[in-house]
Image: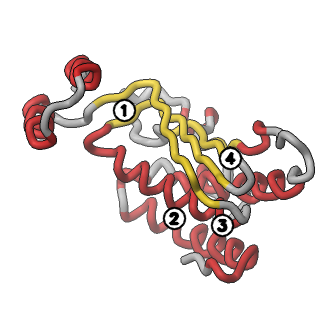
Amino acid sequence: MWNRSAGAEGRDQLYRRYLRLSPRLRRICPPNRYGIYFERLIDYRGGARGVAGGTGVNQLEHVIKAFVSGRGRTPIRHSALIAAVFDPEVDHTCQPRRGFPCMHHVTFEPHGRDGLGVTAFYATQYYYSKAYGNLLGLSRLGCFMADALSRQLVRISCVASVAQLGCSKKRARELLKAIGPLPSDVAQRAGDTRV
């Protein structure tokens, strides 16, 4: 959906295409019924309220503009390089399990002369069932933002308030057996992690 060689026009085209597609993505995939991370990043407070089509804030473009305008300053104001996902008006509910969003926000950090780091903050991270998909999505987002900022993606970090294996104890034992002995501190933490 993204034409990387088209620069800012390619980004705008991606945003328009994605916003046209996002209502359908929410309909056909039940876990997406409360929202989609990329949609919240490019249409914050738009699609989440049922008003699709780019009526909200495009936080990624804000980060890009803040980064580019701050190149002459040292350091860049890091709070301008944050994109929120959690929206209290929509997401504060009393549901025992909601499913979305687990990620609160994502930050973009310059590293050296031409590197970019991405850090995502999660309320909950399920290692077995969600971590790979989350890291893959963050990697794609990081590559997209690094390209827009003429940088190289050099680091992805995930911070989780609550980290869980996200599988049965039996499956966790099978996985530990398959990957072999772990260093004692890792094995101890894995044994203490709630399943």
| Position of residue 110 measured from the top left corner of the image (x, y, whole percent) | 71, 47
Q: Return the residue at label 1.
A: 97
Q: CA distance from mark 3 to mark 4?
A: 14 Å
Q: Which mark is residue 23?
A: 2
What residue would you read off at disc 3? 147
Q: In the picture provided, is 58 more to the left or to the right than 1?
A: right
Q: CA distance from mark 4 to mark 2?
A: 36 Å
Q: Residue at x 24, y 26 (%)?
A: 183
The CA span between labels 1 and 2 is 22 Å
SS for dot 3: helix
| Sequence-first disc among 4 and 2 | 2
Mark with earlier residue (3, 2): 2
Is the N terminus in the top left, top right, bottom left or bottom right quadrant? bottom right
In three-dimensional space, the C-alpha distance between marks 1 and 4, rounded to whole angstroms, equals: 37 Å
Residue at 26 percent across and 41 percent down: it is 128
Query: Would you call the spot at circle 1 few (<14 residues within 10 Å), some (14-19), or many (20 or more)?
Result: few
Foreground mark, 4 or 2? 4
Return the residue at label 4.
111
Judging depth in this view, the residue of 191 and 13 nearest the camera is: 191
